[in-house]
Structures are given as structure tokens and as C-alpha cells.
Image (cartoon, coloured by chain):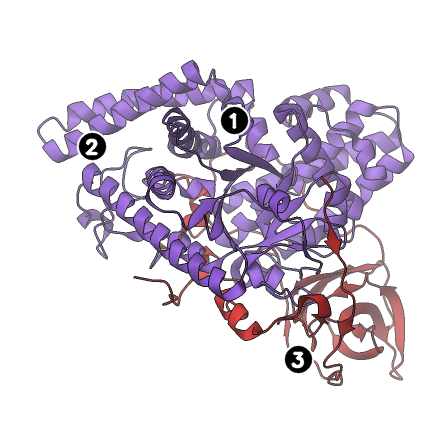
Chain colours: A red, B purple
Amino acid sequence: MRKKKVAPKKVVRKKTVKKPVRKKVVAKKKIVRKKRVKVVPVISEIRAEESKYYTPKAEHQHFKEKKGFEFPSRYNECKIVAMVRDPYWIYCYWEVNFKPEGAVCLRINNVDNWEYFDIETGSADNWFINVPHSNTTYCIDLGYKTADGRFVLIARSNWVTTPLDRPSDVIDEKWTIPDWNKIYELSGGGKYGRSSADLSSPGKKFRR
Amino acid sequence: MEKGYLSLILHAHLPFVRHPEYEDFLEEKWLYEAITETYIPLLKVFDKLVEDGVDFRITMTMSPTLLSMLLDPLLIKRYVRHLEKLIGLSFREIKHNHHNPPFLAIAQMYNRNFEEILELFTGRYRSNLPQAFKRLQDLGKLEIITCAATHCFLPLQEIYRPAIRAQIKTAADHYEKIFGRRPRGIWLPECGFQPGDDRILMEEGIKFFITDSHGVLHASPLPKYGIFAPIYCESGVAAFGRDIESSRAVWSAEEGYPGHPDYREFYRGIEEIKYCRITGEVPLENKEPYVREWAVSRAAEHAGNFMFNREKQIEHLNGFLGIKPIVISPYDAELFGHWWYEGPEWINFLIRKIYYDQKTIKLLTPFEYLEMNPENQVSTPSLSSWGFKGYAEVWLEGSNAWIYRHLHKAAERMIELAKNYSGNTRALNQAARELMLLQSSDWAFIMKTGTCVPYAVKRTKDHLERFTRLYEQIKAGTVDEHFLSDIESKDNIFPDIDYRVYAS
């Protein structure tokens, strides 16, 4: 059976004002992969969604590991890959297969207006980047800074778009909404991401 | 006439765990426990409803990895062996508790239960649970939907779209072979949706998927009915948003039904024989004996409460929105029975109460809703998941971010192989299997939760190693036959996989 699709006829954009991109580094977090993995199965912390992976005796390794293969530390290439973690964080990892003539640096570009900010990363090969805007497309340049402050590009990442962290400003004329706030509230709006793990505040509505 | 609809969605999934190289393997128990405590109890409930003429609708994911294990002769054999051992254990427990009446009654309950499960599994279900679920689908009571082939969290594979297509197409083909038609719906692993992935779903004939609430609430343009009606993506595939209110009632550890003191305690016990009830906020050793009658009547009460709340919710929404709303309530299937021992009873009571006791709500599948209401708003859902904080953080954080460098490299290499090499089809297909097993989101999830991390690391390593060796051998034109046969016999998932999907 064919669906009748109703295309939005007219799109009304309400707000288009954007804040300028902050030039400073907002936050950063570096991960170092632990060679030896610690196992901490605190029983009381295991929740419903984890219970299917629960085996009382599996806390310690119970299988033999043959020696030989290790995760490669590098793939001998110059490359940077970006991934979206949430509306304000992008993760990227990279590799450089030569010795750059300066400190390795990430340039985070907002591709809507090509404003950018830089992060110096030292000897790291991955980074969580706090970005200023949700619903915005970014790409990250991997490069190094020369002694006179020039940025030399080594590789450019894929483009990634952070998701909207709030309801859209775009209204479809054919589907106008008399009282969005009420619908948002009834839909549990503002409490997104409440999976089994963090449903903390009980809704009072409809409860006996 | 009903005022709205309730769609119960049970997501049944376990990662592919099969170790013929070991006589016994601890993590294979995940499957055995889920069969005994969840899948067969649910089948029992559904079969009895059919027998009693109670009409119902349930939507259920059966992930391709789970289906593969349920159909695997070695795991079936091992399951029966496991169950026989459990029955032996339950006899010993009966003997052991001979002078301890409350515990004796519980041991006897488990003994009867295991004996019945064994009889059902080998008898009525002929060791083929997917066929038992298919029967319910063919009767129109159950809508079985698919999942990504190995439960890959798709938004984190965005840079290699052929790998996403491979996950979806392999799953849909696998489904078709078992259930005799294309899947109409999909459970995107962890509800992980990235705009644009819907096009791949459309190409495979999939009509709908589920997102978390904010996937729809943050859709653009603004969705007129919030999460209480589906929206169409540009591709024409419908997205249904999860209802928070009804989710909380079952999922929540604190206020949800499963935390009630009368229900069975998950932790204390021997194997699947657990003697205590939750009792309250007391140490494990002070838990009191389980009383089956109390627990069952509590499940009935909670089913009544759930129904009452949905009636009120739907009545209110109907008045306010002026449409018949659909309330989407998805849960992990393993929650029912494995975690919440009385969960299948709760579903049983809920369905019967809805059928007999009220006229406000009707159980419906998302597909039936679309057939009845083909006109829906077009709007693009936002990137989202149902994991903690609503996005990708569970699978991309300090404990597990390091894997993506390897996962992406393997996907890139698989695409390279599919585009440039042919000839050794067996090796190329096996490479595709290894890549898919490597991509299971379960490994990253386990690394984060810390329950059996060495195993998750082992699996990541094993599949990367096997893939990498095959990649190198295929490129060199010298595939080690012995090695290939060995991993084909271990990682025997998707016998009909076609590596060429990575070239598209």
C-alpha cells in the first residue's frame, strides 16, 4: 500500500542568529588506553540492561589467551577521523606517519562560516573536543604549528554534524501546533536520554 | 471504540557467543539463561493467549545474532545439556532443603519449571524457537522486526556507509530466509539513528524504526503530535518515538515495578535457582525466602496499574491532540524473566486485562498503525540513541573509544577488498563475517559497564586478528586453507552472507 506523504509546504525560520565561535579551547579530555583492563563488577551497580551480560564467575578471565596478535598501534598513514558524541562533543583520533616540524595541533572548523579554534594536543593521538554549537557541521584539520606560528595542514577529517539539543525552530505550515509546550511536556520533553540507567525523577502525571 | 493505541515492543538480542573450541564456555550461558527465563516463558504466555482466544499484538525484535544462535545445532545441544544439569541441580536442592519448607517449595517450583521447559523445548518447539515465534507472527499476533546484523551501533560507523548498508542488508536477507518475507520494521541497535540512515532502510524495504523520545521531539520541522504519532523521514520510512512515562514504570530500578520487595531477587542463588525475594534495602544475606503467590499477585496488580495509567494517558492525549495517539513502549525482552523474573506473568496479565477489562486502549503494532494512518508529517529525526544521556557516549568514552581506530580500519579494508578482489569468495565472505562480529556494540557496552571486560577485549581482538590475517592473505593471493576452515567453523554466522554488499 502506498503511503501518502505530505511534504512541508513552507518553512518558517524563526531564529537564525548565531553566536560567534569561541576561539578558546573549552575543555579537553585525553584518553590513554590501559594495557591491563581492570574488572570491577560491583554487584549492586549492575542494572537491568547489563544483567543479560551477567555471569557470576566471569569477573576473572577464565579463558586462555594465545600470544601473538596485539592491537596495532598505528597503520602507517596520515589521517584524522571525527565522530559525534553528543550535541557539544566531538571525538577524533589521528595518526601522523612522519615527524612534523612543530607541535601537533587540531584546528576545529565550523564549516558553516569557517570560523575556527585550535587545540594543541602534545603527544596524544585522540581527543574529546568540546564544540560551541549543536546542529552545526564541523571538520577538523590535523596539522602542526611552525616556529613562526603558521599552521601547516597534515590531514583533514570527515565532516560531522552535531545534533540539535532542543526542539526545532522550523515550523511546517501544514502542521501548525497550537500548544507545543504542552505537547513537549506530555512527550517527556527535556528529559531526553533517560534510559533505564537514569530515570531518577518520577513523573507525577497519571500516577495513582 | 478505542481512544488510542499501545505498542509494546520487546527487543530480544544477545551477541554471537559460540566457542566450539571449549567444552564449556561461561558466556554461552547468557543464551541458555535467556532461553529458560525469557524466550520460552514468553512463548508460553503467547501460546496460551492464542489458545484462550485472547487477541493481542506484540512487536518483537529478534536480532540476527540471537536468531543465528537459536538455530545453531551445537548451541542447541549445549543448551539441552545445560538444562539437564540444571534439573539435576534442582533435585539436589530439593534433597538439600528437605527440612526447610519455604526453600523446599521454591526448589520444587524450579524443578517443575525446568522439567517443563525441557519438554517444551525438545517437544512442542522441536528445538527451533524462531519457528515457534514465526507461528505467532503468521497468526497475526506478533510482528517480528529485525535489527542490524550484529547489533552494530550505526552512528559511530558513519564514515563508512557501505558498512552500514552491509549491516542492514545482511540482516534483512537473514530475516527473510527464516520468516519468509522481508522485515517491515527494524530496531536500530540502541535506537542509534543518524539522519540519512533511513535511506538505507528504505532500500531494503523497511517501513519503520524506533527512536528515543528526543529523536522525534528534536526532529525538524517541529513534529505536530510530539511522540504520539510517527513522522516520515524524507525517504518515506516512519520513525516512532519512545514514550518516557510507560518506559519508566518498567525500566526504572528505583520506582519501576521490578524493584518491588515481593519479586524475586536477581543475585542470590545457585545458577538459575534463586531463593530470595528482593525484601527491601537489606544486605544479600538478610533477604527473605521467595513466595511465589505473593509475587504473582503483585504482577497482576502492577499490570492493572500500568493499564490504568495508560488509559488515563491515552484519554488525556486523545482529548488534547484530537487524534488517536500511539504510545510506544519498548523494553529489552530479557528484562522480562531474566532480570524481572515475574515479567512474563506481568505481560500475560496486562494483555488479558487490556482485552477483557477496558475499551480505551488497543494493542497495535507500528506497522498496523501506518496502514490505518498513512498520512503523517514529514520531518527528519535528530541523531539520538536510548543510551545514557541520549547520544553516543556509552559506546564512545574513555574505556572504549580506542576500538574505533581499528573498527574503522577494518571497514575501510573490507570495502577495498570488495571493490578490488574476487575469486576466493569463501575468504572474502569470512572476512565480512569477522568484520561484522567485530562491530557488535555489545563489546563497547561491556567495556563501559565493566562486567566482563576481558571477554569483550578478547572478542574485539580475535575478530580484528582474523579479519586482518584474511585481508593480508587475500591481498597476497595466498589464503591459508587450514586457518580459513578453522575460523569458518568458529564464526559460522550468516552462511549466506555476500561480501559484495560492501562494494555498493
Say which residue appears at 74% left-offset and 38% top-offset. B204
Q: Amino acid at mark 1?
A: Leu
Q: Quadrant of residue A142?
A: bottom right
Q: Is residue A132 above or below residue B124?
A: below
Label 1 to label 3, Cα distance in Å? 57 Å
In which quadrant is the N terminus of chain A drawn?
A: top right
* Crowd around label 2: few <14 · some 14–19 · many ≥20 (10 Å): many
**In the rendered image, is residue B264 in sight?**
no
Say which residue appears at 39% left-offset and 66% top-offset. A203
Q: Amino acid at mark 3?
A: Val
- Which is more foreground, mark 2 or mark 1? 1
Residue B187 in picture, x, y percent from top left: 60, 44
In which quadrant is the C terminus of chain A drawn?
A: bottom left
Front residue (pair A75, B375): B375
Residue B335 in picture, x, y percent from top left: 42, 44
Q: Which residue is mark 1?
A: B139
Residue A163 numbered tag? none
Q: Which residue is mark 2?
A: B106
Q: Which residue is mark 3?
A: A26
Left or right, A57 with reference to B183 = left
- Which is more foreground, mark 3 or mark 2? 2
Say which residue appears at 66% left-offset and 80% top-offset. A26
Q: Amino acid at mark 2?
A: Ile
Q: Is residue B408 above or below residue B74?
A: below
Which chain is indicated by disc 2? B
Asked whether disc 2 touches disc 1, contact meaning CB atoms under 8 Å apart, the reply is: no
Residue B427 in picture, x, y percent from top left: 78, 26
- Give the secondary structure at mark 2: helix
Q: Residues at marks 3 and 2, common chain?
A: no
Front residue (pair B184, B129): B184
- Give the secondary structure at mark 3: loop
List the single residue furthest toward the front.
Answer: B1
